[in-house]
Amino acid sequence: MDSIKMKKFNNIPLSVLDLAPIKQGSNARESFKNSVELAKHVESLGFNRYWLAEHHNMPGIASSATSVIIGHIAGATNHIRVGSGGVMLPNHAPLVIAEQFGTLESLYPGRIDLGLGRAPGSDQATAYALRRTLNSNGEDFPDQLTELQGYFDHTQPTRVRAFPGEGLEVPIWLLGSSGFSAQLAARKGLPFSFASHFSNDYTLPAMQLYHQHFTPSNVLKEPYAMLGVNVIAAETDEKARWLATSQQQQMFDLMQGKPRQFQPPIDDLNTAWTMREQAAFDEKLSSTSTIVGNPDTVKRKLESFLKATKANEIIINSSIYHQEDRLHSYEIVAEMMD
């Protein structure tokens, strides 16, 4: 990566998390086109990395074949790091992931990140369709991780080897929304990314566990934690709050087990939502890891979040329906970077 082009906010890098949303009435092809445009845009603005998340059986998210879209984004950009945020390792054979990311690293050397999660990224039926078995709910994730690492550094006690993959330095991150991955990342001496953007209440406990139990490794001498934040920035607080209703609809759909394509903003909450749903929306907006507002509001809340968490890096999810508003939201944040 050409580090000269990377900018910082309060001396820390900012990165981008893309869920490749499929908008109402649109399709995956349009989603990927928008992702390429966004990746090029944030690269030019000085963001550090661009991650995509593995989700399945969700009509509003197009990044199910995560390694494929990572290659597509890396091929369309020049220096920004591109990776998974994350690949759900229990869904895959570790050898396959080693080969996929070994291939990506061979194509785009020094630019690929491998973020790993242990959640299914789907419901149980979809997990079964992916794995053909439900013998594990992530309990063997540490063993899978060790196996995966072995393919890269050739410490597997078997004759099976990963080509491409073996001997390549693909940074492995552990992702989490609870304390399990925080402790495992600490024990392994790996960088850690916490999903604060949807698990805000556990952020500080997870960070404490990670720092308390961290053991230096040959890949990381000191703890390094990146936290997820929802940021929806606009010229006014009112417009930002209106844009945020798309993300909130997505959250309600998932809570009800009825995912849809990504919905446009709602003009009148009173006609679309119950009082309980409006209260949940207001609670989400008050979360320290969901930042919605004008440039001054966003800067103040982002600085406050950094002060409270002491994160080494922030990865920003901006789930915004209109592409021009999504691009502009990142422009607003970029103007805050040095």
Image (spheres, helix red, strand yellow):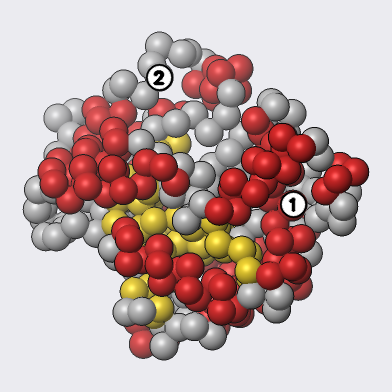
Mark 1 in CB contact with mark 2 (< 8 angstroms): no
Q: Is 324 placed above or below 33 here? A: below
Question: From the viewer's perspective, is the residue at label 1 or at label 2 nearer?
Answer: 1
The residue located at (18%, 34%) in the rendering is: 156
Q: Is 157 placed above or below 192 here? A: above
The answer to whether residue 288 is left or right of residue 204 is right
Along the line of sight, the residue nearer the viewer: 306 or 104: 306
- Where does the image place residue 281, in percent across and percent down from the top left? 67, 46
Along the line of sight, the residue nearer the viewer: 243 or 33: 243
- Where does the image place residue 315, in percent across and percent down from the top left? 45, 61
Q: Is residue 137 visible?
A: yes
Indicate which disc residue 137 carries. Answer: 2
Question: Which residue type does callout 1 highlight?
Answer: Ser
- Where does the image place residue 164, in percent across and percent down from the top left? 35, 50
The span from disc 1 to disc 2 (Cα, nearest Å) is 31 Å
Q: Mark 2: which secondary structure? A: loop
Indicate which disc residue 272 carries. Answer: none
Residue on which the image places disc 1: 246
N-terminal-most mark, 1 or 2: 2
The answer to whether residue 112 is left or right of residue 236 is left
Question: Which residue type does callout 2 highlight?
Answer: Asn
Q: Is residue 160 visible?
A: no
Q: Is 171 placed above or below 54 here? A: below
In terms of image quadrants, where is residue 240?
Answer: bottom right
Q: Mark 1: which secondary structure? A: helix
In terms of image quadrants, where is residue 9?
Answer: bottom left
Q: Is 144 placed above or below 42 here? A: above
In terms of image quadrants, where is residue 167?
Answer: bottom left
